[in-house]
Amino acid sequence: MITAQVIDRVKGGLVVDVGVRGFVPATHVGSGKLRNIEKFVGNPIQLKVIEIDRDRKKVVLSNREAEEQRRSRAKEEIFDNVKVGEIVDGTVRRLTDYGAFVDLGGVDGLLHISEMSWARINHPKEMFKEGQKIKVMILRLDAANGKISLGHRQVLPDPWKLIRENYKTQQTLKVTIGRIVQSGAFIKLPEGAEAFLPVSEMSNRRIKRPQEVVEENQEVEVQIIDLRPDERRMVLSMRALGGGGDAGVGYQRRDAGGPPGGGYDQDFREGGGGGDRGRGGPGAKGKKGGKKGGGGGRGREFEDDFEDAAGRRGYATGGATIGERLGALRGLLGRDEEIEDEAVDADAISETEATPDEVAAIIEKSAEKPAEETPSEE
């Protein structure tokens, strides 16, 4: 192992000065896959002698094997001398979507994106750049596979210590919606950590997606409903403050159907929707009801009860036929006699114009007429 100065770039590699001219093949420079090896000219590099021809005064050297040997020694030193939990210096060598490879002085460790910051980040480039000097903590050492896991947020001040002092349960906050996911939204706190707003806590009405209520960068008022700094957990709620819109008309209770007309929820749009165990309310074009309940829209069972009650009380039932109205009113008046069609003025009980009171008056009037005797055969 020697150190030599690169003096020229020639076809196929580099020329170095080792007292005589030495040659380093391009496949033995760096990782062996470098294209721009001109950058080494004028600089000293680590080399390993791999071939000597004294008669021809020819020396062949390898920078790649020298680097591999140096890294192997550095790796052994780290695994032998460094312990989990120690803080060491490193250099960011390469950034990827899932993390960064940090050079610890001859051996690389992986700094995963989840261990870079207390707050959630989308890409490592938000925090680091290649060549940057950073401090990292050794999280795991796998000597058998030669792998080292690193953490950076562990060397930063712990924001949850401040959160423990600055917040309490049922405290009201004004926050800005951050990243939205299917199950809710993340809220960045000034201390550097994140709280979570579940989709179930965004509204009094049932929603399927957070985007129905909130959007990124929107400012909302929330209440802390769960705070456990030891577990690094804070859960927020808009629903606790009545946020996220009013309760849908068709979804006011989980155990009962909605009243006539629609609620705000998609399941009850344009019609009274069913609750979890209730019956659907009557509506013109409801689409479907709740779980285990009657369908939305007309809500057949609820409608039957509604029409029966209307008939007993003498209310107009809208779609009832003349015969149904007469039958209902006959039961209301307590009369069992049959009412002949010719005894009733059909024009007076038009389905579109006659009111229940007018129909009742006609029935009573027809009932006062003496019954006609059946003519004898004579």
Image (tube, rainbow, N blue to C red):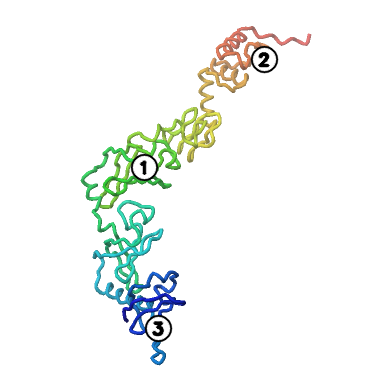
Q: Quadrant of the C terminus?
A: top right
Q: Which residue is mark 3?
A: 60
Find residue 89 and report its image quarter. bottom left
Calculate the distance from the C-alpha at mark 1 to the C-alpha at mark 2: 70 Å
Tag count in the figure?
3
Q: Earlier in the sequence, mark 2 or mark 3?
A: 3
Calculate the distance from the C-alpha at mark 3 to the C-alpha at mark 1: 62 Å
Q: Residue at the location (35% across, 75% down)?
A: 67
Find residue 26 and report its image quarter. bottom left
| Disc number placed over residue 341 in the picture, else none | 2
Residue 217 location (% of width, % of height): 37, 41
Which kind of residue does numbered mark 3 sit on? Val
Calculate the distance from the C-alpha at mark 2 to the C-alpha at mark 3: 121 Å
* Between marks 1 and 2 in the image, the one whose residue lies nearer the viewer: 1
Q: Earlier in the sequence, mark 3 or mark 1?
A: 3
Q: Residue at the location (74% across, 9% down)?
A: 375
Vertically, is 340 above or below 169? Answer: above
Residue 239 location (% of width, % of height): 35, 37
Residue 138 location (% of width, % of height): 28, 65
Q: Residues within 10 Å of mark 2 (few under 14, many from 20)?
A: few
* Between marks 3 and 1 in the image, the one whose residue lies nearer the viewer: 3
SS at mark 1 in the image: strand
Q: Which residue is mark 1?
A: 177
Closer to us: 195 or 179: 179
SS at mark 3 in the image: strand
Q: Earlier in the sequence, mark 1 or mark 2?
A: 1
Q: Residues within 10 Å of mark 3 (few under 14, many from 20)?
A: some
